[in-house]
Image (spheres, rainbow, N blue to C red):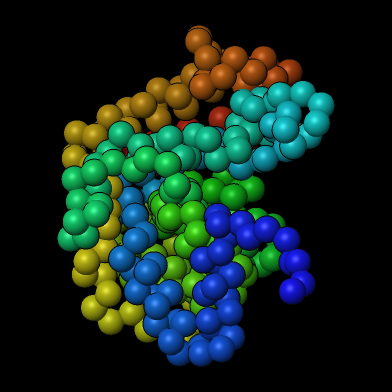
Amino acid sequence: MTDRGAIDGDSIIYHYFRELIERDAEKGRSLIRRMIHDLSIWFPPTLYQSIPVLLPFVIRDPSCRKSINKEREEWGSCDCNGYFRDDNTLVKAIPRRFKITSTNRNYSGRKMAKGFVASHVWRELSDKSGLASRNPVTNTFVPNLVWLPRQLSKLTDRESSFAQKYLQALSVSIFKNVELSQAKSKFADTVWKMFQAPKGIRIDDEKQGLNFFDMSERDIQNMVSDLLARIDKIKHLGPGILYCRRYFKTYANLPEKTRALLISKLSDYAEMIT
């Protein structure tokens, strides 16, 4: 018997579904559709109405971690445009304290523990200019964020896969037609245009039975206040820290023109959500 090495239990479901789709596409897609619908966890549309982009000064940059760059820890430092370099740590932390509202008894009234991944619904921008996570507008755009069990997240990471397209179609069905103020609607329209619309995926009554983080109006207003306070800190170079001491140390060394451009963008955003 040929020795093919050990089996990684953390990836076996991913490979199982890939092979199932190759053997029986209709059955495989039906199962994936059901799993994504039943197990994905979304931010509520009411959060999107208040804060379309949760952290407009943050970009995802895994190279900020010493484990990746092999030289030094740089998490929290700013990039050349003044944006906070994160490895998804800030994004992952946002919903941890919130319970889940769901018809699924395994989720209902509980908080997430280990094994869930903060996933981007759209990995790439429609113009192929880069990854959505590297753009400060699309990185934490509420419709572009969903929490999935790790194995399911792997399936949706495959570009143009059925799993990814179905997840995108769900996001569109949840958020695209949510009523926004005039200013937010204009802003959101520009962001939606940065994503490729999923084709060939029908969403009928599938908005029913989805899972959402349970966030009250007070929770959302507290998030707005916290975001405005952090934007104000960036505008005035402190006082205090912005999640990490590295940020203001590196931000202060940027050219004044660069800081002014970032401040202008953040000020416009702050005015919009106020």
Residue 44 in the image, given as x and y percentages of width and height:
28, 52
Identify the residue shown where x is 82% and y is 26%. Answer: 71
Q: Position of residue 73 (x, y in %)?
A: 71, 24
The vertical placement of 101 against 209, above or below, is above
Taking the image as shown, residue 272 lies to the left or right of residue 72, namely: left
**Extreme residue toward the top, this view:** 239
In the displayed structure image, the side of residue 67 where residue 260 appears, left or right = left
Residue at 57% from the left image edge and 76% from the top image edge: 18
Q: Residue furthest front?
A: 1
Say how many tags the image has: 0
Viewer-nearest residue: 53 or 243 = 243
* Spot occupied by residue 260 in the image (x, y as percentages of width and height): 63, 28
Q: Quadrant of residue 148?
A: bottom left
> Is 118 or 50 nearer to us in this picture?
118
Q: Quadrant of residue 248?
A: top right
Instruction: Please tell me which residue is depicted at 70% across the width and 26% down the height of the picture.
Output: 74
Q: Is residue 184 left or right of residue 151?
A: left
> Does residue 83 show up?
no
- The correct choice, above or below, for 172 with respect to 220 in the image is below
- Does 15 sit left or right of 209 as displayed? right
Against 243, residue 224 (above or below) is below
Quarter in which the N terminus is drawn: bottom right
Residue 53: where, in percent of width, then height? 44, 45
* Residue 118 can be seen in this image: yes
Q: Nearer the viewer, residue 35 or 232?
A: 35
* Quarter of the image with the C terminus in it: top left
Q: Residue at x 64, y 48 (%)?
A: 134
